[in-house]
Image (cartoon, helix red, strand yellow):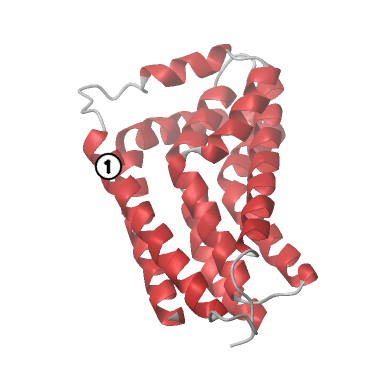
Amino acid sequence: MSGMLEAFVHVVPIAVAVAASSVPILVTLSILLSPNGERVAWPFLTGWILGMTALAVVCTIAAEALPRAGSPREPAQAVGIAEIVVGALIIVVAVVGRLRAPRRSSDDPPRWLERMSRIGSGEAFALGAVLNIRPKSLLLVIAAGLAVRGAELTGVESTVVLACFIAIGASTVAVPVVAAKLAPDRTAPRLTILREWMSRHSRSITGLILVVIGVFVIVSGIGRL
């Protein structure tokens, strides 16, 4: 398997897990359904993409500290051990998040989402950037950085893989924002339905996806040992 193909096989599922993260999607939907939705949604999207990009670059560069070919330790083994640790942490975060999830007796959106309708453009940009450093998001991006490092890519190849990761990871925030801009009247009812559905089911879905990705990363790490 070529380095680029190997990197894509490992990175794309992780990017899908990032895209499926419920918090940024719910924030996006709540912002778009607010009176100032169009004005605030674009700064939020910009902050989300820039924050993800910065974090992905930092994690990939940090992964370069792991041993390379010709060093006393096998580079694949070092990456594998790191992936096993990160994969286990992803599963722990998923389980803890599920156990700590409050039981809701109402189908109404969580209270914290109501505050999203009152934030300004600057706050939206900062929120979009900061959401990238939640434990689950941070661990997923670290896993992607390790996958890129383990594939032994050139600088250009790493850039292409990371661009694909960011495009997929940010898609579930970008698509509703763009759709609301192009067809606001047709989009609004669908956004309302989607927000109500995600408010009820997002924690279970996100938790399951994280467990699957955690196992995937662990298996990937074991395969490098």
In-front residue for pair 66/21: 66
Residue plotted at (64% across, 86% down): 2
Is residue 198 something that shows in the picture? Answer: yes
In the drawing, does residue 100 fall left or right of residue 115?
left
Q: Is residue 130 above or below residue 212?
A: above
Q: Position of residue 28 (x, y in %)?
A: 55, 31
In-front residue for pair 47/42: 47
Is residue 21 something that shows in the picture? Answer: no
In the drawing, does residue 54 fall left or right of residue 16?
right
In the drawing, does residue 179 fall left or right of residue 30?
right
Q: Position of residue 54 (x, y in %)?
A: 69, 45
In-front residue for pair 29/74: 74
Q: Residue furthest right?
A: 156
Corner quadrant of residue 75? bottom right
Graded by Cα atoms within 10 Å as few (under 14), some (14 to 19) or many (20 or more), the crowding at tag 1 reads: few
Residue plotted at (56% across, 45% down): 172
Q: Secondary structure at mark 1?
A: helix
Q: Is residue 96 above or below residue 73?
A: above
Under mark 1, the amino acid is Val
Corner quadrant of residue 148? bottom right
Q: Residue furthest bottom?
A: 1
Question: Where does the C terminus fall, quadrant-wise?
Answer: bottom left
In-front residue for pair 2/24: 2
Q: Is residue 140 above or below residue 129?
A: below
Q: How many marks?
A: 1
Residue plotted at (38% across, 68% down): 218
Question: Where does the N terminus fall, quadrant-wise?
Answer: bottom right
Q: Is residue 207 above or below residue 184?
A: below
Q: Position of residue 180 (x, y in %)?
A: 64, 33
Q: Position of residue 40 (x, y in %)?
A: 67, 22
Q: Which residue is mark 1?
A: 96
